[in-house]
Amino acid sequence: MTELDLAQLQRRLAEFAAARGWEPYHTPKNLAVALSVEASELVEIFQWLTPEQSAGVMEDPRSAHRVADEVADVLAYLLQFSEVLGIDVLEVLAAKIDRNELRFPVPENKGRYSPE
Amino acid sequence: MTELDLAQLQRRLAEFAAARGWEPYHTPKNLAVALSVEASELVEIFQWLTPEQSAGVMEDPRSAHRVADEVADVLAYLLQFSEVLGIDVLEVLAAKIDRNELRFPVPENKGRYSPE
Amino acid sequence: MTELDLAQLQRRLAEFAAARGWEPYHTPKNLAVALSVEASELVEIFQWLTPEQSAGVMEDPRSAHRVADEVADVLAYLLQFSEVLGIDVLEVLAAKIDRNELRFPVPENKGRYSPE
Amino acid sequence: MTELDLAQLQRRLAEFAAARGWEPYHTPKNLAVALSVEASELVEIFQWLTPEQSAGVMEDPRSAHRVADEVADVLAYLLQFSEVLGIDVLEVLAAKIDRNELRFPVPENKGRYSPE
């Protein structure tokens, strides 16, 4: 993890959108939809791969670049969505991990899992 | 934005999965799919709302909680996915913003937009 | 495949929505979003399964019911979306298969594939 | 709705995949994922449109073609998924409409709605 700061990137994204007059498009609904579209573009890279092939996706420079690019897009929309609604992403994630530690005590439930 | 550290949360998530023996499930493919499922659960909250209604989603404590929870889930899977593949999320986002600044010079293109 | 008629089910869905005053919600955008949310609910059933486990999903009556239910939801929204925009789903699918037969001649390209 | 037959199109899709040796890729999990990826490509067309703009999407021939194409892809994967698992899509949809008629009696619940 680099020394880059998440809050600073979030600010750059907000300024980027404002400078281009994109704010009217950036309703919470549209940003959530855009986030899910980007998440699906990430999935698309893996859709026909076996689990084993999916583990090697960074070895090919072209697919590695695609993956990195989609990760950036997902994070960009997640930060813009959260900015618009005043959500602190690190705070909500920390709170969620705390809840999950209570909900999934250590040795049980090694099977299927949904973190919700 | 709080003082919480993204890298530290990413580490907690990795330890959480390891302690529960979930690593075999956490192939890149499965984590990308789980990310997109969570993104859709976020979208579901907004699906029948007008743009205006979507802007008020944090006013109702119940929907505010749901939104925060889904944001946490999306970020959790994004960090786990990136951990497994050795991707630095802040670095790829910074690089992407740099590219987008070249790609979308300031005054043009105030219309439809895909950040890819 | 039963003797049921797709056009007739599409008509029932339109009448169902009209009788409940849901038409204002049924913009093409909202219906496309709802379709993708239902498709993700279908995916959710499979997200932690191996390819082999996924082939046995109909053996457990509870997951069989869930799968059938999500298939119905996806088709319902696809038909409602298409109704609203005047798209004949069978016609567009037939045309697409015709195009794909030209695009993917028989013996080649047994590898990764996107039908688009 | 044309005279085309859904069962016949489903058979053509199965033969198409078999002739190209694609069956090993067509696990239920992969087909569900591919379905959701196509649904998101449909959503992408609408992501920055207002509800009003979304209603006019068939007026522009280029976007009309994209929409029709994505509808075909969604239906193609839905039929292939259902074929692999032995699900009769018309039967499950008819059963679902029956259940929804009991679940949403006519005059109430004109607000938010999830057909599940």
Image (tube, coloured by chain):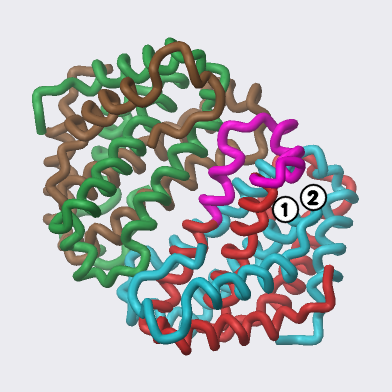
Chain colours: A brown, B green, C red, D cyan
Judge left or right: residue C55 versus residue D66.
right
Type of amino acid at the residue the image marks with label 1: Phe
Q: Residues within 10 Å of mark 2 (few under 14, many from 20)?
A: some
| First to last magenta residue range | C39-62
Q: Nearer the viewer, residue B84 or C18?
A: C18
Output the chain of dot 2.
Answer: D
Above or below, D44 against A71 in this view is below
Residue C63: x and y in percent read 65, 45
Q: Position of residue A49 (x, y in %)?
A: 65, 33
- What residue sits right under mark 2 in the picture? D84
Which image quadrant is residue C98 in? Answer: bottom right
Determine whether D74 is above or below C67 in the image.
below
Residue A100 seen anywhere in this rendered image of the structure? yes
Dominant secondary structure of the residues highlighted in magenta in the image: helix
Res. D102 image quadrant:
bottom right
* Mark 1 element type: helix
Regarding residue A60, the answer to whether it shows in the image is no
Residue B36 is situated, as x and y percent measured from the top left of the image, at 45, 44
Q: Is residue A28 left or right of residue C106?
A: left
From the viewer's perspective, tell me whether residue D115 is left or right of residue B56: right
| Quadrant of the rendering where the C terminus of chain C is positioned | bottom right
A18 w.r.t. C49: above or below:
below
Q: Secondary structure at mark 2?
A: helix
Q: Residues within 10 Å of mark 1 (few under 14, many from 20)?
A: many
User: What residue is pinned by disc 1?
Assistant: D81
Q: Is residue A39 above or below residue D96?
A: above
The residue at 29%/34% (across/down) is B93
**Residue B75 percent location from the top left of the image:** 32, 34
Residue type, mark 2 in image: Val
Q: Is residue A98 magenta?
A: no
Contact, mark 1 vs mark 2 (Cβ under 8 Å): yes
**Quarter of the rendering occupied by the N terminus of chain C:** bottom right
